[in-house]
Image (cartoon, rainbow, N blue to C red):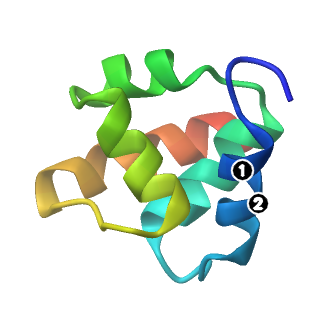
Amino acid sequence: MSYGYTLKLASLNKKASVRSLGVKLGRVCIKNNMPVTTVASRLGVSRQTIYCWFSGKSTPNENATKKIKKLILKLEQ
């Protein structure tokens, strides 16, 4: 894995429910090799928050959800 995506994080992301917006974000970012630090910076959150979202341990709040949806759309183009 590149850009700091450990095999553990990628595995947790694959096992997590895609119904979670944070997990979906993780799949798109991993696929596009977007670094965690870049994702965190764009969304105004910590790297730890990104890891929790990607693995399905927590879900984004309403404010972050809007930003995440925009980022996903941009990356899926």
Query: Disc number at residue 11?
Result: 2
Q: Nearer the viewer, residue 28 or 74?
A: 28
Task: Name the side, left or right, on which 68 lies relative to 17.
Answer: left
Q: CA distance from mark 2 to mark 1?
A: 5 Å
Task: Name the side, left or right, on which 44 lies relative to 31.
Answer: left
Circle 2 crowding by C-alpha within 10 Å: few under 14, some 14–19, many from 20: few
- Circle 1 — which element? helix
Is residue 77 visible in the rendered image? The answer is: no
In which quarter of the view is residue 4 placed? top right
Please determine whether, in this image, residue 47 is positioned above or below residue 51. above
Q: What residue appears at the point 26 percent right and 29 percent down from the top-left corner?
A: 46
Q: Residue flagged by tag 2: what amino acid is it?
A: Ser
Q: Position of residue 52 (x, y in %)?
A: 39, 54
Tell whether label 1 touches label 2 (CB within 8 Å). yes
Q: Quadrant of the N terminus?
A: top right
Q: Which residue is mark 1?
A: 8
